[in-house]
Amino acid sequence: KAGVTQTPRYLIKTRGQQVTLSCSPISGHRSVSWYQQTPGQGLQFLFEYFSETQRNKGNFPGRFSGRQFSNSRSEMNVSTLELGDSALYLCASRRGVTEKLFFGSGTQLSVL
Amino acid sequence: SQELEQSPQSLIVQEGKNLTINCTSSKTLYGLYWYKQKYGEGLIFLMMLQKGGEEKSHEKITAKLDEKKQQSSLHITASQPSHAGIYLCGAGSSGGSNYKLTFGKGTLLTVNP
């Protein structure tokens, strides 16, 4: 069974640009969560989608948005990139909301 | 919001030594997860503890949950270089739902051969 797949693995952007990250969950998993990880703040929750609906949202500005498609695949978008958005973005999926998360390898975003 | 504090922040041990990592919550714990991460990569699930007093083991790693102290500990026996990495604890935001998992900042473990 394939794990959680995130693309691209690495990304370099400049300030002001926008970026879209993709996540394919494990087959059968309807919940997808997104996290941002930085050395200073650690792992911070962005949002979670379940059956195409946003279930929960972390404390991030509106520049961070996401969506989930009918096949459970999810995308995360960051507009007007800032230097502080440089981070490892991790996607995780689970079958139900009370089950453990399975993480992808992440997308390393560098904003120059 | 719930905060999880891990200690120590980093740890260097000699191969073969035992070690313990602690995770303390600012609020009541409704399930506690332990994950391991290699630098720059995704998190690998280790164990989940749901009840006070619960203890689970996987190979040489044992985790315990003390509900009264709102604390969990992860103990590694006879450490090996393969145990090196970042250990993170995570907890659900409210009882029974786990809609939002909050994580500690992690403990960086180095095992010297």
Image: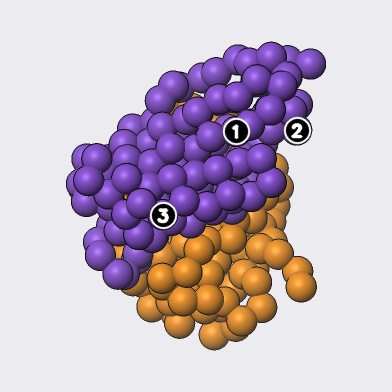
- The mark tally for this picture is 3
Q: What's the residue at 32%, 40% (across, down)?
A: B71
Q: Nearer the viewer, residue A52 or B45?
A: B45
Foreground pick, B97 / B49: B49
State how far apart marks 3 and 1 are (Cα).
17 Å
Name the residue carrying label 3. B54
Q: Amino acid at mark 1?
A: Ile
Considering only vertical position in the picture, is B46 above or below A82?
A: below
* Residue A87 showing in the rendered view: no
In the image shown, does B96 or A80 lie closer to the viewer?
B96
Q: Colour of chain A?
A: orange
Q: Write down the residue under mark 2.
A: B82
Dot 1: few (<14), some (14–19), or many (≥20) neighbours within 10 Å? many
Q: Amino acid at mark 3?
A: Glu
Query: Which of disc 1 and disc 2 is earlier in sequence?
Result: 1
Q: Are marks 2 and 3 on the same chain?
A: yes
Using the rendered image, report if marks 2 and 1 lie on a common chain.
yes
As helix, strand or loop, the secondary structure at mark 3 comes to: loop
Instruction: Tell me the residue that label 1 is attached to.
Output: B76
